[in-house]
Amino acid sequence: MSKRLLINGSVHDVDLPDNVPLLWVLRDEVGLTGTKFGCGAGACGACTVHIDGEAVRSCQITLVDVWGEVTTIEGLGTPTNMAIIQQAWVDHQVAQCGYCQSGQIMNASALLHETPQATDQDIDDAMKGNLCRCGTYPRIRAAIKDAAQRISEKV
Amino acid sequence: MARIKTIARRTFLIGSTAIVGGAAFGVYQINRDAPNPLVAGEGEATLNPFVLITKDGVTLITPRAEMGQGVQTTLAALAAEELDVAWEDITVLHGPPAQAYYNSVFLGFAIPGAHYKDTAFKHGLRQQVGKVGKLLDLQGTGGSTSMKDFYERMRYVGASAREALKIAASIKIGVDVADLTTKDSAVIAPDGTIIPYVDLVEAVRNVTAPDVELRDKSTWKYLGRPMPRTDMVGKSTGTAQYATDIQLDRMKFATVRMSPTRNGMISYDADIAKKMDGVEAIINMGDGIAVVATNTWLAIQAAEAVDISWAPATYPADTAGLRSAILASLKGEANSTVRDDGDVSTDVAGTEVTAEYYVPWLAHTTMEPMTATAYFTGDALEVWAGNQSPTATRDACAQAVGLDSAQVTINTTMMGGAFGRRGENDFSVQAALIAKAMPNTPIRMAWSRKEDIRNDFFRPAIAAQFRGVIQDAKAVLVDGKIAGPSVFHISSLRQQGSIPPGPDRLHVEGAADQPYSIPNFRIAGYLTDIDVPLGFWRSVGASANGFILDTFIDELAHAAGTDPLQFRLDLARSEHGPSASVIEAVREMSAWTGNTPDGIGRGVAFTHSFGTPVAEVIEVEDTGNGIKINKCWIAADLGVVLDPRIVKTQMISGVIYGLSAAMQGEITFSDGMVEQENFYDYDALRMHTVPKFEVRLLENNLFLGGAGEPSTPPSMPALGNALFDLTGTRARELPLIKTFDLIL
């Protein structure tokens, strides 16, 4: 069954069974490999993308259920034109192995969109679904706060 | 897509083993006999196995795998320090498997004796023995060895290349070499003329460089400072490439289901699976099956639908049976007595303390499950794998598909975590075999999370019995027995086909090798003969023994009525100054008084491992709604700190990894299979449970210490000791969630 998706501003017609999770549509069909597979159970957050600005676990959304425009890490910014939050990630040298960071950044980006002045409690609540085995959490927290500051100054 | 093909071509080129062009470098003694695996193409010059200059810039081969520890950044900084290349001009590549990139530290571990006792002579002996690794093509990332390995090698590489470029410039512009300087990727002439390195590609090809002295530490501009990581932008934009991200034309997607009993497959029925959406092939892998499909998820669904009958495990089938076997081995003969100071069998007067400990089986759970991409064309195999052992991976893949090693190209990609797991080559070999079954079709293989946990190579469960004697508030006797299956023996048998001679030091590391002056001090190892597949888990033996010995030291301190921090300090001071200093450092950092208010507990712990002494203080709080960890203070001494931010990050990372296991990590077995299958039943610290950190790095250590592992061992006892301080309950078994109401 062909389904039309809007991903990072581009239209993609996808011909895969309805029940294939969005994660695997992005990675194997569309070729957007920045979104990562970690658990397949919504338990680690590595596959987080936005649908109409809302952070979702793409391993838990089937193709047929995708209800709006999809934004992935590649749509947030590029190496030569990073989003504010990505720049904050670089400035705070957040990543170690880096595998969870696309999901962390997408989740944090949605958090700041919803709660521009996120408190420590807000960060705990929003980010605790995103696992990092390297233990980059202290710098993730610092980068989120810094990005919030920069976004508020820009507005 | 085009970009990836370009990279693939480049790595193919570099992967060839011919020695073509380039400057002839006789100066670099250590690598004198190792051929340069780099092939200079048109408009390129390879100055040695580590430096490639093209018209676009300088590529440094940083031949240790990037698993998140920042190794490639600091390896690049070591070379760049001498090469005078501007930081933003550098590209780093892991490079191919090659003798030139052998690990010169691994084999030095075989020299007996605790590392803290190393003299200059013994350190030199370790280095000499380590060089034998070259003859074995022993290339590997692990054991916290990379900086010890390359601290001098990589700087010599940069210095040689710099001098070669100066000679090339001298010939080109007719100015004496002595009058030339270098700065920001260019040679500078006395009149200020700037000759960029990239303009010297042709001229440098016929240059032989002279011997070069290394610059003094006082002149360093990159080393000792926090350098921006070379992988940071890629990892912040989703463009960093892992093995699971490789894209090739006509690619198919695969997964495997291998024997969870680790003893092969009796039969399988794939009738339903082969008719499922997208399935292209179901392959008999001997000890499991692989499914190839048009999409990874469809492959995983089909693999689950295959009805498989597994052969029963050859080890005791459940956790209790395994534990009984480990405990039983404590009653047998000791296999090693690596530490035996004084005489523990004499009758020593004083207060006797005894305790028994047990720590569970653990899995690595890297964020990226095992993955590899492979392409087989009949007479060649190319593999993309995040791996810690490229030469062994190359040879194992070649053997598996029936090719010579020279016909196999290994691309070592970024790794989504490793922690020791990716030193194995099982996943790379599987991808190679699937590719062989589907010739001329690129195969991208990914394991499910369940597969990743069940088919791990585990940190074994360990049991211990300790007896100590306190006399005049001092420890005068410690007699420890440590039992469990041998990581070293089981992994050596699997990887090399034999068990190295001599006592198994890894089995007792973190206990037998501690810098404690105790007049009667014996640590005996007891090996349990069970064949659960074991592997190297961050800090290996010290991950268990650090908890066991340090918890016992804490018990002795309390029995002696002495402040536990002062007790450790007294034991370490006469034995190893740098160890005493890190204990003093955490006392000062945490404003340790030995007293804590109600509802707050503090614990201290210390372990010397991988050449680095680390002390930690952890503070816990009873919130009334569960216990949380407030803060962790860490002091470590690596001798020389090459990048303070990266080292501090590693210290914090190691503690978070250790605390995750200490709090809740436990692998259990039933019917010969691991019961855990995902992060919902094998979890780790998260944003809301991670403490605050403060790290101090000292530089008193005589020799360079490792960074990736040494903070893990003391984290577990520090937490246990803090919980004892808070509650009065002594946990002698992990994970701690079994004893305490921890907030998860």
Image (spheres, helix red, strand yellow):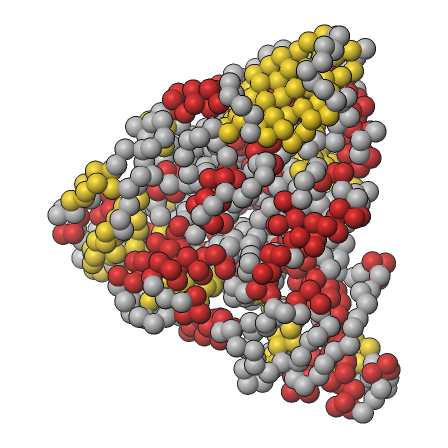
> Where does residue B581 sit, x and y in percent of width and height?
81, 34
> Where does residue B207 sit, x and y in percent of width and height?
71, 83
* Viewer-nearest residue: B518 or B737: B518
Q: Is residue B662 visible?
A: no
Residue B113 drawn above or below residue B13: above
Q: Is residue B70 visible?
A: yes
Give the quadrant of residue B208: bottom right
In the image, what residue occupies the spot 36% across and 35% down?
B677
In the image, what residue occupies the spot 66% across and 38% down?
B609
> Where does residue B658 sit, x and y in percent of width and height?
57, 33
- Judged left or right of residue B58, residue B493 is left
- Judged left or right of residue B590, residue A9 is left
In the image, what residue occupies the spot 86% across and 81% down?
B178
* Viewer-nearest residue: B602 or B15: B15
Residue B661 drawn above or below residue B121: above
Give the quadrant of residue B161: bottom right
* Viewer-nearest residue: B661 or B380: B380
In the image, what residue occupies the spot 36% across and 27% down?
B316
Tally of numbered discs: 0
Q: Quadrant of the N terminus of chain B?
A: bottom left
> Where does residue B742 sit, x and y in percent of width and height?
53, 21
